[in-house]
Image (cartoon, helix red, strand yellow):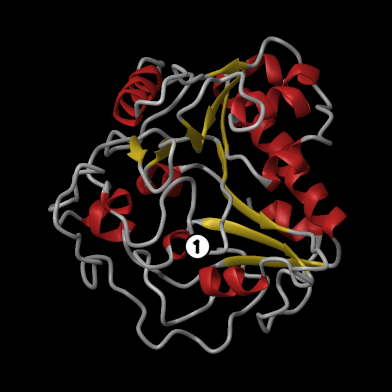
Amino acid sequence: SIGIHAFLTPQPRNVLIRTKNVVAPTSPSTHATPSTSTSTSSSSALRAAPARKVHILPTESDVTSAVHRIVENSAKSAIDDRGHFALAIPGGSVLKVLSTLEPSFDWPSKTTLAFVNHKCVSTDDVASAIEAQAREKFLDRWGTDVNVISLGGSSDGHAEATGYESKLRGFSETTLPRDGDGFPVFDLALVGVGDDGHIGSLYPNRDEIDAIDGPWIVAAFAKDPPGISLTLPVMQRARATVISAAGKSIKYPNGKAEAMRLAVADEGVTPRDFPASALREYAVWIFDEPNGSEMDLELSTVEKAVADA
């Protein structure tokens, strides 16, 4: 069972086959080396298959509760399995969600924490560095035993990407397992989605999205200073990939409702012009009512969302 608790309507007219309809890479640039492989694992990375696990919960606090429970369940399962928990986190609203998580047992001391994306800045720059923000909001409270994988702190995107991947590859498979294609398998990847569909630092219509044939980390030059990002196959291969969106404002009364609809249900987008759509079939999507308001879905429950992760 794939645990479908909400059905998307209408159904996509052109469901992509694993070895067809791959988004063609653009010409090479200095940003990343586009893929030229036609292997099954590569072609499946750049497709927008139907979403399978989508949950709209009544409130923002329900979404937070679901994410907290997923983190703790993933940690317990991984530690019971091999004695260690590999977690990947982004910045933005996910940091707010984690800021209220109080570990119910000592899983942080058995955790290796990597970043889904991070700017190439000094790691103690609270204004720009996800690591500094995470330490301020929750990591320092969780304790000093969390094994945080830090960047080098320079503004050199290529050097930081190479260095970060080298650090990740240096871990044993007990700490960071690999799959049959040699990619790392995080126990849990929490991924954020921007209004333009970017995930990590994989932005629309840029070569970074095409890095699907080997690299774990890519340098990202959509902004200045540059950043680094997990590549798309790494986000897809986590034991659980979770994308949540909750909350609203006067300016955005429905939060990221339009972006979430495009990411999950729109038939007209491709992973190249809306990268989040490449995670449709891999992620558990958890929204509150405002952020799920543009999708014709029934309300789900925290319990069902947690069970799907």
111 or 61: nearer the eye? 61
Looking at the image, residue 192 lies above or below residue 165: below
Q: How many marks?
A: 1
Q: Residue at x 70, y 43 (%)?
A: 70
Q: Residue at x 34, y 64 (%)?
A: 272
Image quarter in which the N terminus is found:
bottom right
Looking at the image, residue 121 lies above or below residue 23: above
- Residue 220 at what x, y percent from top left? 37, 42
Residue 188 relative to residue 23: left or right: right
Q: Check disc 1: other Cα within 10 Å, few if <14, some if 14-19, many if 20+.
A: many
Q: Residue at x 40, y 26 (%)?
A: 155
- Mark yes or no: residue 109 visible: yes
Q: Quadrant of residue 106?
A: top right
Question: Which secondary structure lies at badge 1?
Answer: loop
Q: Quadrant of residue 228?
A: top left
- Residue 195 at what x, y percent from top left? 57, 63
Single out the residue that lies furthest toward the top: 144
305 or 102: nearer the eye? 102
- Mark yes or no: residue 1 visible: no
121 or 112: nearer the eye? 121
Looking at the image, residue 279 lies above or below residue 227: below
Q: Circle 1 sits on which residue?
A: 197
Residue 76 relative to residue 219: left or right: right
Q: Residue at x 20, y 60 (%)?
A: 25
Residue 45 relative to residue 193: left or right: left
- Residue 130 at what x, y percent from top left? 60, 31
Which three-letter amino acid code belongs to the residue tagged 1? Answer: Gly
- Residue 9 at what x, y percent from top left? 58, 87
